Amino acid sequence: MPLYEYECPECGVRVEVLQKMGEDGTALKCQKCSVVGLRKVISGCVVQTAGIGKTSCTLGGSSGASGFT
């Protein structure tokens, strides 16, 4: 099962959830403020290539940056 990241639209708390492909966050409840209906977000990533080193990217992450670094 894939790991998905969800964010609460009310308080901004992010959680990671293992769930089947095709499921959404409409039934998920925020652990902080109890709002039901979390939204799926794109997680940041780290890519390592042989001999070149690490490249990290933030796509919609909480740091506010976008693109590759």
Image: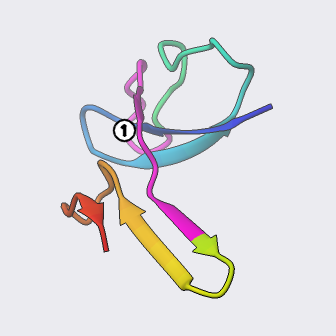
Residue 45 in percent (x, y) is at 50, 60
State which quadrant residue 64 falls in: bottom left
Magenta stretch secondary structure, dominant = loop
Task: Give the residue number, with chain letter if any, for mark 1.
Answer: 33
Compared across the picture, whether 25 is left or right of 12 comes to right
Give whichever of 52, 68 is nearer the camera. Answer: 52
In the image, residue 2 lies at what x, y percent? 72, 35
Q: In the rendered view, would you say 46 is above or below 30?
A: below
Task: State which region is magenta.
Answer: 31-47
Q: Is residue 67 above or below residue 49?
A: above
Q: Nearer the viewer, residue 2 or 14?
A: 2
The residue positioned 72% from the left and 27% from the top of the image is 19
At 26% from the left and 43% from the top, the residue drawn is: 11
Q: How is the image coloured?
A: rainbow
Instruction: Residue at 37%, 48% (x, y): give it.
Output: 13
Identify which residue is drawn at 42% across, 31% down: 34
Query: Where is 39 relative to 7, above or below?
Result: above
